[in-house]
Structure formats: structure tokens, C-alpha cells
Image (cartoon, coloured by chain):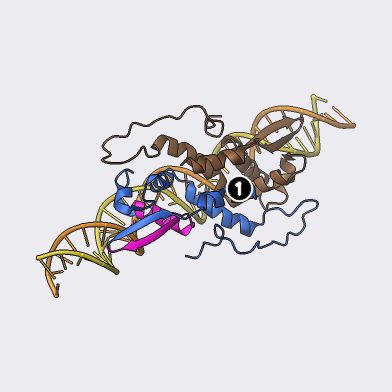
Chain colours: A blue, B brown, C orange, D yellow
Amino acid sequence: MGVMNLLHPAAPAVDASCCVPSDKPVLGSEEAQQKALVFKALADPNRLRLLSIVKAEASGESCVCDLTEPLDLGQPTVSHHLKILVEAGILHREKRGTWAYYSLVPGVMDDIAGILSAL
Amino acid sequence: MGVMNLLHPAAPAVDASCCVPSDKPVLGSEEAQQKALVFKALADPNRLRLLSIVKAEASGESCVCDLTEPLDLGQPTVSHHLKILVEAGILHREKRGTWAYYSLVPGVMDDIAGILSAL
DNA sequence: CAGCTATATCGATGAATGTCAATCTATGTG
DNA sequence: CACATAGATTGACATTCATCGATATAGCTG
């Protein structure tokens, strides 16, 4: 945890801009940093592929073993990428028994699209 | 140039996956790399702020001088960020006289949203 | 409890990235 | 032409990041 408040929003968090001669309320650096976290999570080819696999799964879930195989990466690396996606609020992790199942957070794609159009 | 073919698409570029036991056509690593470029461009707070400023400008355009000031960055750094956004196909650059004007590529936000939902 | 399996965490390493100061290019002006 | 200005490019530096091998944790099974 620690990061997630953007994709499942709370408050606008206005920034008090100073010394700006003539402009509208530009995206504050705080907000910008928050939003950048989401895109940082998407800014890696292997993470996009992970999302693609999870998304394509009929059950809506994939366990790590299903995710490690198709990508040409070691298990620790996949685990690392999944963690980043979870921390960005994009994936949901549920452990059942020995296995961990990852699924898309519902509506998250629309939420990200919303971040974009609200820039 | 060099990068831009995703936001203004051409062909699907299928990948011949091999040795994959039982899965749907997962996002190929080629495609994944292309798409990641777009998100990489969005994965920096200062670039998000640049986009926010350009987007908020009533005229639809901003020149670099307008962009350097509100961010706490040097001119070369802003120039660098703008270049990345242009190469990602997100911003359009037009030089008129001494000044360079940057504007959002029309429809680009929707295009990016499309990339997401098509993952 | 001993051993196996699935997954996560740690530490190290090389590559990519953001930033700046200095320099270059191009346009406009005296 | 000499000079000023807007912007881009270059080179250096510090930080971040993706990846891996080794190890740790947690659940299952004998």
C-alpha cells in the first residue's frame, strides 16, 4: 500500500501556485507525481504483456505460474512487476492456498482514461 | 520520427508465438514495446504538467517560454521533455519565426485510451 | 516434523532516465 | 554584418529501474 488513492480517488488536493504571472491552475507537482505513478506502472513492455494476459483470461484471474511462462522472465522478476501493478492500483492480488491470483481492478482502465482526459 | 506509428496506427503486427502451451494471442513483445513508449512518455510528473499546460491553453498552443516558467526546470530540460512527447506522438511541434509552438495532437487522448482498452 | 512447491523479498549489477551547464543553430534587429 | 534571443543539442552526473541469483516465507503433504 502507500500509493493508492488516485485510481480510487478521494480529494482534489489543490496546490498553491506562486509567482506564476498569468496562467490557469496548472497540474500541481504533487498531483503530477501521483498520476505519473500510474503511467510509470504502464511504462514497461513486460508489464503491458502481463496486463494483456490477465485481461484475456476468461476467469478474470491468473496465477503467477500462468504469467511467468509466456514472458521470457524469471519468476522473481514477474513477481516484482506484479507488485508494481498492484501498488499502482491496477491489479488486485488474492492469495488462495499456495497460489496467488491476480485480476484487473474493476473499471481501472476507464479510471486511467479519466486521468488522461482530466489532465 | 522513428517511433510514431502507434497513435496513428497502420497494421496489427502479429507475433508468431512459439512454445506456448495453452494461451490466447498474448500481446507480442514488439507491440508491447511500442505501446510502452507512449506510456513512458506519460510516466514523468513534469511531462504531465507540460501536457496539462498545453491542454489548458485556450489557443491550443504554447510556446516553450510559456512552458519553462511554471515548471521549476531549466530550458534544456523542458526542451528535452517536449521532444519525448513529440516523439511519442502526443504533442505536435510547429516553428513559427523564432518561436516553437506545441499543441496536443488531435484525438490523442482517446487514442491512448484505446490502447489501454485494447490491451 | 521433514520436505516440496508457489511466491515474495533481498542484494547486486548494468542499463535507462532526468537534470544541468555549456554550446550550437536559427531567426530577428540594430 | 554584429549582436541578441528562442530553442535544440551535447556531455556529464546522479538516480532510478529491470533483471537475475540466492534466499526467505507460507502452505501443502507425507
Percent x, y for residue B61?
73, 39
Quarter of the rendering containing residue B80: top right
Quick check: can you spot residue B85? no
Quarter of the rendering containing residue A18: bottom right
Q: Which residues are magenta?
A: A77-97
Output the chain of dot 1.
A
Percent x, y for residue C10?
35, 64
Let me know if residue A78 is in the magenta part: yes
Q: Amino acid at mark 1?
A: Leu
Quick check: can you spot residue A52? yes
Residue on which the image places disc 1: A116
Which of B25 and D2 lies nearest the eye of the viewer? Answer: B25
Q: Residue at x 67, y 33 (%)?
A: B93
Q: Residue at x 55, y 49 (%)?
A: A110
Q: Secondary structure at mark 1?
A: helix
Which of B42 and C15 lies nearest the eye of the viewer? Answer: B42
* Image vertical order of residue A33 relative to residue A46, above or below: below
Q: Residue at x 41, y 35 (%)?
A: B30
Which quarter of the rendering shows the N terminus of chain B?
top right
Percent x, y for residue B49?
65, 50
Say whether residue C7 is left or right of residue A84: left
Percent x, y for residue B84?
58, 39
Q: For mark 1, does the 10 Å Cα neighbourhood hold few (<14), some (14 to 19), or many (20 or more) residues?
A: many
